[in-house]
Amino acid sequence: MATFELYRRSTIGMCLTETLDEMVQNGTLSPELAIQVLVQFDKSMTEALETHVKSKVSIKGHLHTYRFCDNVWTFMLQDALFKTEDFQENVGRVKIVACDSKLLTQ
């Protein structure tokens, strides 16, 4: 299964990366093993989102900018409103990064 490295920029991904870097610097973990952990993190995040997340959300807002590069869409929204069945939340600025899931099965 192919994966994207998108989730490394999430809060949990950044914390994992920082922790692995610290462990490599301290000599408690080899750089090769740290890379293997990150690759497994990418696979696990992709699988978890595909199989465990069933919620749907609608997003409305002002589209400030958008880009399509290397099969990745990036949307910058302002004054966005996120709605689910249970709640809604207003957010000042949002960056959404989206990839074609068909690329993961190639």
Image: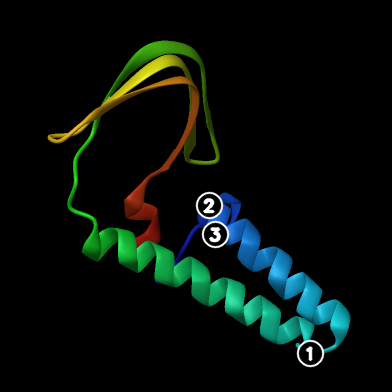
Q: Residue 82, relative to residue 25: is it above or below?
A: above
Tag nearer the camera, 1 or 2: 1
Which residue matches tag 1? Answer: 28
Q: CA distance from mark 3 to mark 2?
A: 12 Å
Residue 5 in view in this figure: no
Q: Tell which circle, 3 or 1, labels the residue nearer the N-terminal end.
A: 3
Q: Quadrant of residue 22?
A: bottom right
Callout 1 crowding tier (Cα within 10 Å): few <14, some 14–19, many ≥20: few
Q: For this view, does 63 lie left or right of residue 60?
A: right
SS label for mark 2: helix
SS label for mark 3: helix
Q: For this view, does 26 lie left or right of residue 49?
A: right
| Image coordinates for residue 37, horizontal then vertical, percent | 59, 79
Q: Tell which circle, 3 or 2, labels the residue nearer the N-terminal end.
A: 2
Residue placed at 42% from the left, 64% from the top? 45
Q: Tell which circle, 1 or 2, labels the residue nearer the N-terminal end.
A: 2
Q: CA distance from mark 3 to mark 1?
A: 21 Å
| Image coordinates for residue 102, horizontal then vertical, percent | 32, 53
Q: Residue 59, relative to residue 106: is it above or below?
A: above
| Image coordinates for residue 21, horizontal then vertical, percent | 77, 71
Q: Amino acid at mark 1?
A: Thr
Residue 12, numbered circle: 3
Which residue matches tag 2? Answer: 6
Q: Amino acid at mark 2?
A: Leu
> Is 29 in front, or is 92?
92
